[in-house]
Every structure is written in C-alpha cells, then in structure tokens.
Image (tube, rainbow, N blue to C red):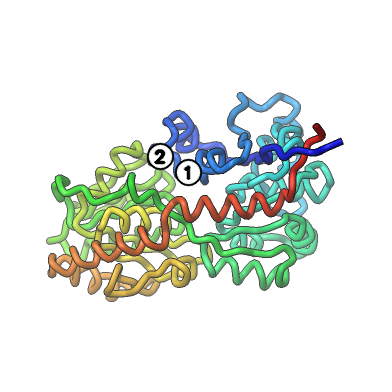
C-alpha cells in the first residue's frame, strides 16, 4: 500500500462573542477578521480548518455537563472557563490533527479535559493572561493545573512577560513556550489623509487592564484638551464620572471604532502593569495607521515589538501621570514631530509586525504539532 499526503485538519477553538460572530459574517480579507486568529490564512496555507462556532447552540447534554464541571472546578479552588463550548466540540476536536486554542476561556477547559484523556488531539495553546489566572488558584490544585499545562505540544504567548512567567512556572520546554508577536493587517489599517481630527486624544480598548481612571484624572487637569474614549461596558463604572472634555462611547461597531482611531490627533493607551496586555491590538492598528501613540511600557510589549521611545512611539511607565501628561503634551505641541513618529510607527509594523508574519508563525507551530499526515491509497 502506498501513502499520499492530505491536508492536515486544524480545529480552532474560539471564545463565543458578538465580535467573533460579526467577524465570521464578514468576507475573508476584511479587517474585522483579525479576531479569528488567522482562520483565512491558515486555510489558504494548506490546512483544512474548522472551528467551534460553525455549529449552532450547544446540545442540552453539553450544557448540563458543562455546568456541572464548571461548578466542580470552582468548588475545588480551580479557575474555570467555557466547558459547555468545549464539550460540544469535543468529537470534532478529536477528529482533527491539531487543536488551536485561541483564548484561555476555552483553553482552560480544553487542557483539563485533555488531562482526563477526553481530548486526545495535539494542542497548541494561546495564553492571554494565564499567569494572572494561575495566581488565583487554591494551593491544593496548583499541581493539577501544572500537570494539565504540560500536555499541550506548544504554548504561545503574545508578550515576553507572559512567556517568562509561564516558563518559570512550568519549567523550560515542558512544553515549549513561544513568544509570538501579534500582527496587524497593514493594508486594512493605513493612514487616512482625509480624516478630520475631532479630538486631541483618542483611547480605544475593552480589556480590563486599561487604566481609564488615570486618563480621566489627566483630563481633569488639562481641560483645554479634548478626549474621546471608546470602551466596552465593562468600564461603565469608571467612565461614568468623565469630565466635560471627555466623550465616552461604548461597544461601537468595528467601522466606527476604526473611524474614531483615524480622527484622534494622538492615540493614548494607558495600561495597568501585567504580563499579557499592552493594548497590543489597538497599538498595532494605530501604528499601522501612522498615528502617534503614547502607550504604557508593560511587560507585554516592552520586548519583542520593536518599540523605541521617541522614535516610533512614546513609552511611559505604568501609573505615572506626570510622564503620561508630558508625552502627550510633547506630541500635541509639536505636530511635525507627531507626524514623524507616526510615519516611523507604520514603517515598524510593515517591516516587523505584519499579519502574515503572525499567521505564518502560527501555521508552522500547528504543522509541527500535528506532524506528518498520510492517508492510505
């Protein structure tokens, strides 16, 4: 009998969200599909790709079992996730050659089920804040989680701070923990010369590590500056006390958010210190759009993203109001310098942080995890 190669089957696990559902409704190649972590590019690159959101609602038995497991994990002092979605997709995952878990919400249940031998397919796991979750575990279950997380073929993290923390926890190369710089579509995000500025400072982002309280305190000190904040409703409590020179918008559609980014004179992204979030997605989108950016130097972006303070961005320490104010004032007060910083920002992402560079790296990790694939002729 002879063997012939077939396309490796990759199964992607996503967190259920309106953003993801909207992205799936868009045609391939549109900017919104960045939240699918390379679905289109992986398919074009020779993988037979499927994902958990292709099916409809989870079966009743998956919902019931997922709820039971969720309660059991929390009662034991563990950190849970979306067991329902993972259980509903388990047979499809086991039929694949490799599973790519794109976020911890589905990844945590996946590795726990793999430890129980209910998922047998090789796993590539993307960690986005896993160290902060591990810190919340009860001491009695830390060893169990460490054992579960030694089972994936590879772990990916988008910040060196998270890579260092996971390697310290799991040990070197058990499994290998890779730093992979996130990327941006530099065709979809590019300068918009026709955009009319409508605010001095624009800040965009949904994740809970954004330091909007710091930005509001700055707005109170600088009433002559206009601010626009585009956030998720998770930030309603903090942003409800915004001063009059701050416009706050929640949960805008992608196209409107993109327009708000283009219409800010300076993009400002204050972030609390953490291992995984440096406002990375919006940072790269703003840089690709040739916007001057002020961003917090967190462990997530301090290394690996080719950021140079004063050259292609302004980097400020976490929780440093004076430094933040000075960096913004520096760019607003010198439009020519702001333009130069934005231009070099775009050069940086085009050269080092393109979307295809990111998806090519993920593709190679998935192919390495599943190994050679043959079928009998």
Residue 186: percent from the left, percent from the top? 35, 51
Q: State the separation of the CA atoms marked 2 and 1.
A: 7 Å
Q: Is 140 on the left-hand or right-hand side of 57? A: right
Q: Is 102 on the left-hand or right-hand side of 33? A: right
Q: Is disc 2 placed on a helix, strand or loop?
A: helix
Q: Do the residues labelled 2 and 1 touch (CB within 8 Å)?
A: yes
**In the rendered image, which residue does mark 1 sit on?**
35
Residue 265: percent from the left, percent from the top? 19, 57
337 vs 357, nearest the viewer: 357
Q: Quadrant of the N terminus?
A: top right
Q: Looking at the rendered structure, which numbered label has been put on residue 32?
A: 2
Q: Residue at x 40, y 45 (%)?
A: 232
Q: Is disc 1 placed on a helix, strand or loop?
A: helix
User: For the residue carrying disc 2, how many other residues have a C-alpha within 10 Å: few (<14), some (14-19), or many (20+)?
Assistant: many
Q: Is 106 on the left-hand or right-hand side of 358? A: right
Q: Which residue is drawn at 74% across and 48% down?
A: 372
Residue reaching furthest right? 1
Residue 153: percent from the left, percent from the top? 72, 56
Asked if 83 appears above or below 351 in the picture, the reply is above
Q: Residue at x 21, y 53 (%)?
A: 264
């Amino acid at each position: 009998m002879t063997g012939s190669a077939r396309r490796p089957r990759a199964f992607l696990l996503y967190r259920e969200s309106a953003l993801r559902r909207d992205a799936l409704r868009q045609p391939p190649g549109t900017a919104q599909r960045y939240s699918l972590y390379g679905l289109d590019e992986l398919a074009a690159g020779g993988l037979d790709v499927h994902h958990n959101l292709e099916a409809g609602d989870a079966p009743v038995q998956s919902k019931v079992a997922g709820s039971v497991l969720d309660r059991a994990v929390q009662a034991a002092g563990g950190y849970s996730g979306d067991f329902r979605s993972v259980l509903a997709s388990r047979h499809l995952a086991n039929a694949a050659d490799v599973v790519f878990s794109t976020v911890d919400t589905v990844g945590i249940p996946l590795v726990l089920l793999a430890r129980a031998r209910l998922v047998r397919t090789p796993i590539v796991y993307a960690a986005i804040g896993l160290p902060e979750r591990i810190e919340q575990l009860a001491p009695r279950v830390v060893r169990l989680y460490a054992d579960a997380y030694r089972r994936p073929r590879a772990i990916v993290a988008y910040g060196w701070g998270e890579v260092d923390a996971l390697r310290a926890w799991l040990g070197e190369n058990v499994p290998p923990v890779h730093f992979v710089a996130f990327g941006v579509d530099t065709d979809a995000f590019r300068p918009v010369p026709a955009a009319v500025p409508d605010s001095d400072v624009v800040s965009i982002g949904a994740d809970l590590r954004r330091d909007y309280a710091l930005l509001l305190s700055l707005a109170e000190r600088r009433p002559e500056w206009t601010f626009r904040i585009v956030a998720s409703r998770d930030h309603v409590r903090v942003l409800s006390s915004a001063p009059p020179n701050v416009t706050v918008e929640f949960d805008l559609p992608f196209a409107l958010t993109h327009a708000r980014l283009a219409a800010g004179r300076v993009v400002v992204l204050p972030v609390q210190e953490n291992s995984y979030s440096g406002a990375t997605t919006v940072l790269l989108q703003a840089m690709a759009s040739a916007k001057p950016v002020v961003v917090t130097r967190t462990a997530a972006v301090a290394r690996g993203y080719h950021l140079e303070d004063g050259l292609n961005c302004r980097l400020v320490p976490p929780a440093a109001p004076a430094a933040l104010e000075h960096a913004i004032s520096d760019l607003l007060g010198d439009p020519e310098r702001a333009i130069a910083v934005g231009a070099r920002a775009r050069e940086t992402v085009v050269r080092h942080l393109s979307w295809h560079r990111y998806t090519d790296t993920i593709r190679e990790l998935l192919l390495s995890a599943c190994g050679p694939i043959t079928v009998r002729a």
